[in-house]
Image: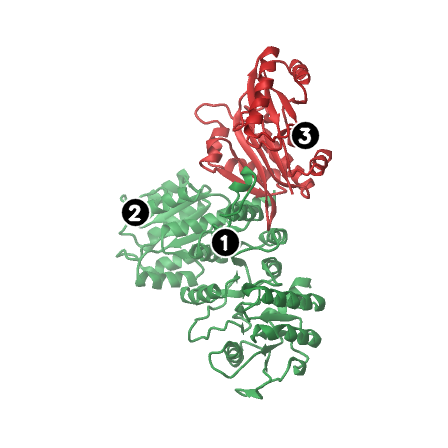
Chain colours: A green, B red
């Protein structure tokens, strides 16, 4: 087994977790984390053992409490620490003695808060390096894995919803962002297979996680919210390895941080952190997201269409509303894609099956009196047409003669059997959302505006081009 | 490299144009056939060898912006004019920086003007050296139409850099112009990447600005260059 997989596996599927600083005081970090594991154990999701550690308690909710790390059973392979910062270094030494190799330090108040904190961080790192311990944190919310029940997110379930499992990994420095994002993903129905918030990134960093995710069969898209990278070259190497097999999407913040940097050369004055990150992302095949929404629009497209990357950049658009078709065509130009020109065969096929007022072309407008069958003819033509590389199907479910479930089934059928990526766009309110959800559950990524649908496809095209380039 | 060692030994942290071009030349980058004259007699001799008209540029570590100091004099047509300009260039330098240490005067051929590009190198604290490419003049000054890659780059990277700047049509040949020598730019970018990759312990930043690029098949030449050491 790969060394990195061996090292990081206990973070995601431990045999036994020690919760250092577990408490019975409701709402305290040590209590929420304990409750998370306990609930997941009761639900049958968390299969390992739970060992609370607290010198002042004998028992929490029926669980035996260990007075010290030294007393912990020998099968403990993950320690989650939520005790005050000043006690962490000595606890790390106990952990080293015990032979536990994976530690999540939730506690804040280290490097982010001055010299003494930095000194403690160095001490912790030294103990970790000397004893082959991997550390996530400090100052983080840690790890969330819905499949194995690992959940160190110290925001209780009644305050923050958890997303269901899915093929997307999400990595972030910021704990608050992690929590908000998980809550949002739960609401948006986006499945997250693994979330890691690494806080001060003392040890485990983006590069380690990329190397781990290469081998993680549960994950097929990795998303990062990056504030800064410590070891740029390590990041580049790891990014190049993973993007050969899995798409990576990054949202980079701090666009203006370089502003004040004094440079003596002309070139130096033109280089900002942002331009450098742009270069890094381009050279490593990482898809850069403009914002949070874009990141998950891309993640959704990759999760569903990873094995159907477009062979080119020629987009075909099918719509039942002229305006929406124009918006999609504009977006095609805006995101550097091209409108496909349909083959003569396709045009004839469409004219043969369309009433005279429907528009065969690109966009193909099945118009407002469409039924589901008209969509079927259009999709059939686009899927067959060698001049079309990817398809956007805009469905305004509001039109009167359209059987919603029938068009959903047609889309799902073609999305399944076509080798070309198909994304759907459904604009509307509550009723549309309801049908969009059904369509998504059938494996078709659905977007609320033509622009967002096309932009997601542009990400697929970009990644596809990168793969072609590196594979020569 | 000897030039770099010598500059460091003299306590300086940047290479003047003449020194920078020696480094570039060693890596096969196209630089003009120019010579550093320490005396007026040398200048006259070099001008004769190169052939009039010539340009003169005064080299001083203290004068970084040569045109501001008016120590670049162009289109010198005769030995008489050269004698006269030799005095003027030194006087201008003294006026601009009385303490300027003068390394000599670079005597250079007058170059045919080409499309101006800029190639540069900067060092990022996290990712190391990055290579920059853009069109010169207002495109870089006003529009900041430049693109970066982390060094080392591949040939594909170089081609992509050239194509992705907004002003690329100017190189490709807009409005009936001949296309510029793209292969020459690719070659320059790759050589700078190689040079910096080799000398990354020494080099901090670098500007090749401007570089003249000629029409397809006619090459390119580095007109001015600066290298800042670590």
Same chain? Circles 2 and 3:
no
Residue at point 55%, 80% (across, down): A22
| Residue A116 against residue B200 in the figure, above or below | below
Q: Is residue B181 in sight in this rendering?
A: no
Label 3, label 1: how many angstroms apart (C-alpha)? 40 Å
Residue A379 spot, x, y in % from top left: 40, 50
Same chain? Circles 3 and 1:
no
Mark number for residue B22?
3
Mark number for residue A107?
none
Mark number for residue A252?
1
Residue A262 spot, x, y in % from top left: 54, 45
Taking the image as shown, residue A396 lies to the left or right of residue B164, namely left
User: Where does label 2 land, which residue?
Assistant: A323
Secondary structure under badge 2? helix
Viewer-nearest residue: B111 or A337: B111
Q: Mark 2 lies on which chain?
A: A
Residue A409 spot, x, y in % from top left: 39, 59
| Residue A356 against residue A26 in the figure, above or below | above
Q: Mark 3 lies on which chain?
A: B
Taking the image as shown, residue B88 lies to the left or right of residue A377, namely right
Q: Mark 1 lies on which chain?
A: A
Residue A186 spot, x, y in % from top left: 43, 67
- Residue A108: which quarter of the image? bottom right
Label 2, label 1: how many angstroms apart (C-alpha)? 33 Å
Residue at point 57%, 19% (across, down): B88
């Amino acid at each position: 087994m790969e060394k990195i997989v061996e090292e990081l596996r206990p973070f995601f599927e431990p045999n036994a977790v020690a919760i250092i600083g577990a408490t019975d005081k409701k709402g305290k970090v040590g209590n929420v984390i304990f409750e998370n594991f306990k609930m997941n154990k009761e639900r049958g999701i968390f299969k390992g053992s739970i060992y609370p550690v607290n010198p002042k308690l004998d028992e929490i909710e029926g669980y035996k409490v260990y007075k010290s790390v030294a007393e912990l059973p020998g099968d403990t392979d993950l320690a989650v620490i939520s005790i005050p910062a000043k006690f962490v270094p000595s606890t790390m030494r106990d952990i080293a003695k015990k032979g536990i190799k994976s530690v999540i330090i939730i506690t804040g108040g280290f490097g982010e808060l001055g010299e003494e904190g930095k000194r403690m961080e160095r001490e912790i790192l030294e103990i970790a390096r000397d004893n082959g311990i991997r550390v996530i944190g400090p100052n983080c919310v840690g790890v969330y894995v819905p499949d194995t029940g690992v959940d160190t997110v110290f925001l209780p379930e009644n305050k923050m919803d958890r997303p269901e499992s899915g093929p997307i990994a999400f990595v972030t420095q910021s704990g608050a962002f992690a929590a908000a994002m998980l809550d949002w993903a739960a609401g948006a129905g986006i499945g997250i297979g693994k979330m890691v918030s690494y806080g001060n990134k003392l040890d485990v960093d983006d590069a380690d996680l990329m190397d781990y995710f290469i081998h993680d069969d549960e994950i097929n898209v990795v998303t990062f919210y990056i504030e800064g990278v410590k070891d740029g070259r390590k990041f580049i190497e790891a990014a190049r390895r993973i993007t050969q097999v899995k798409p990576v999407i990054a949202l980079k913040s701090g666009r203006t941080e370089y502003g004040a940097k004094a440079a003596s050369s002309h070139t130096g004055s033109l280089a900002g952190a942002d331009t450098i990150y742009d270069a890094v992302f381009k050279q490593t095949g990482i898809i850069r997201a403009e914002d949070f929404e874009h990141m998950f629009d891309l993640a959704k497209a990759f999760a569903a269409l990873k094995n159907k990357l477009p062979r080119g950049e020629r987009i075909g658009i099918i719509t039942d509303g002229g305006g929406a078709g124009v918006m999609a065509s504009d977006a095609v130009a805006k995101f550097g894609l091209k409108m496909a020109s349909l083959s003569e065969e396709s045009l004839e096929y469409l004219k043969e099956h369309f009433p005279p007022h429907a528009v065969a072309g690109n966009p193909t407008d099945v118009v407002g009196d469409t039924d589901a069958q008209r969509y079927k003819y259009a999709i059939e033509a686009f899927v067959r047409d060698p001049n079309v590389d990817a398809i956007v199907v805009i469905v305004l479910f509001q039109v009167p003669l359209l059987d919603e479930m029938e068009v959903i089934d047609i889309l799902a059928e073609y999305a399944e059997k076509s080798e070309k990526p198909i994304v759907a766009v459904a604009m509307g309110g509550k009723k549309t959302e309801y049908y969009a959800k059904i369509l998504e559950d059938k494996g078709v990524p659905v977007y609320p505006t033509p622009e967002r649908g096309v932009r997601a496809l542009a990400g697929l095209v970009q990644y596809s081009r990168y793969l072609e380039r590196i594979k020569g | 490299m000897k030039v770099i060692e010598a500059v460091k030994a003299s306590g300086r942290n940047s290479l003047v144009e003449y020194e920078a071009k020696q480094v570039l030349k060693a890596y096969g980058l196209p630089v003009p056939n120019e010579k550093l004259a320490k005396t007026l007699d040398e200048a006259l001799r070099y001008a004769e060898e190169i052939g009039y008209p010539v340009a003169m540029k005064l080299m001083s570590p203290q004068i970084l912006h040569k045109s501001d100091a008016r120590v670049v004099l162009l289109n010198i047509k005769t030995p008489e004019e050269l004698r006269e300009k030799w005095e003027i260039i030194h006087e201008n330098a003294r006026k601009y920086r009385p303490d300027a240490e003068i390394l000599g005067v670079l005597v250079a051929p007058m170059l045919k003007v080409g499309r101006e590009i800029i190639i540069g190198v900067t060092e990022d604290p996290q990712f190391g050296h990055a290579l920059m490419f853009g069109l010169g003049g207002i495109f870089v000054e006003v529009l900041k139409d430049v693109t970066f890659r982390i060094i080392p780059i591949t040939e594909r990277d170089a081609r992509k850099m050239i194509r992705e700047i907004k002003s690329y049509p100017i190189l490709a040949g807009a409005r009936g112009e001949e296309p510029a020598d793209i292969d020459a730019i690719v070659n320059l970018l790759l050589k700078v990447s190689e040079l910096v990759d080799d000398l990354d312990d020494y080099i901090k930043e670098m500007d090749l600005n401007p570089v003249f690029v000629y029409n397809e098949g006619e090459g390119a030449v580095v007109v001015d260059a600066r290298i800042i050491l670590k």
